[in-house]
């Protein structure tokens, strides 16, 4: 049995109020942060949490939780233990735990994850393998 769940978007959101997500890493909680407007080119890895709100061109390897914010853009392979995607990825995604695709997420590439949670509005174009267990 695959570990896939689909969530509907909340009907209404208060203006400028950020809906808390138990899986999201806030900017203040991230140990490695690519800020809005920043661009990083090259492969990098971290044994701590990563939050991407800027652009990364290259492979990302995260041993903990990776969060790609709404303005975050990644061109390259993504490998992580856990991931929450609100922005865009152009490349394959491998997550050994749970991958959450929020309503603003867009992935162009193959997905491999143990568990997948997809919010209404999220999109991906590629193969998807969810192993469950």
Image (cartoon, helix red, strand yellow):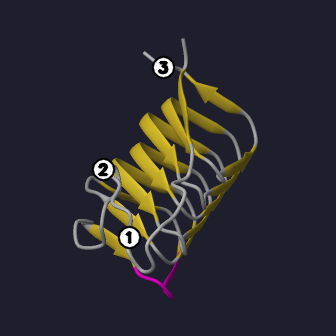
Residue 18: which disc? 1
Query: Would you say the magenta stretch is mainly helix, strand or loop?
Result: loop
In the picture, which quadrant includes the N terminus? top right
Total of numbered circles in the picture?
3
Residue 50, given in percent of the width and then of the height, sits at: 35, 62
For the view shown, which residue lies furthest in the front direction?
12
Residue that numbered label 2 is attached to: 22
Q: Disc 1 and disc 3: Cα gap in Å?
A: 30 Å
Residue 25, given in percent of the width and then of the height, sits at: 31, 60
Q: Is residue 115 above or below residue 35?
A: above
Q: Residue at x 55, y 18 (%)?
A: 2
Of the pair 57 and 66, the residue shown nearer to us: 66
Label 3 Cα crowd, 10 Å radius (few <14 / some 14-19 / many 20+): some
Label 1 Cα crowd, 10 Å radius (few <14 / some 14-19 / many 20+): few
Residue that numbered label 3 is attached to: 132
Q: Residue at x 53, y 70 (%)?
A: 70
Q: Is residue 5 above or below residue 110?
A: above
Secondary structure beneath label 2: loop
Q: Residue at x 62, y 48 (%)?
A: 120
Is 39 colored magenta in this rendering? yes
> Tag 2 or tag 3, which sits nearer the N-term?
2
- Of badges 2 and 1, nearer the viewer stands 1
> Tag 3 or tag 1, which sits nearer the N-term?
1
For the view shown, which residue lies furthest in the right direction?
125
In the picture, which quadrant includes the C terminus? top left
- Of badges 1 and 3, nearer the viewer stands 1
Residue 71, given in percent of the width and then of the height, sits at: 55, 75
Q: Which residues are magenta?
A: 35-40
């Amino acid at each position: 049995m695959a570990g896939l769940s689909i969530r509907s978007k909340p009907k209404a959101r208060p203006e400028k109020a950020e809906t808390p997500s138990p899986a999201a890493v806030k900017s203040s909680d991230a140990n490695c942060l690519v800020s809005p407007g920043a661009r990083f080119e090259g492969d990098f890895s971290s044994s701590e949490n990563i939050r991407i709100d800027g652009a990364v061109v290259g492979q990302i390897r995260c041993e903990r939780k990776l969060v790609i914010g709404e303005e975050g853009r990644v061109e390259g392979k993504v490998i992580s233990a856990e991931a929450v995607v609100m922005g865009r990825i152009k490349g394959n995604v491998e997550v050994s735990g749970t991958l959450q695709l929020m309503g603003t997420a867009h992935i162009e590439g193959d997905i491999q994850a143990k568990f997948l949670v997809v919010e209404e509005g999220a999109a991906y174009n590629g193969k998807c393998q969810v192993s469950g267990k």
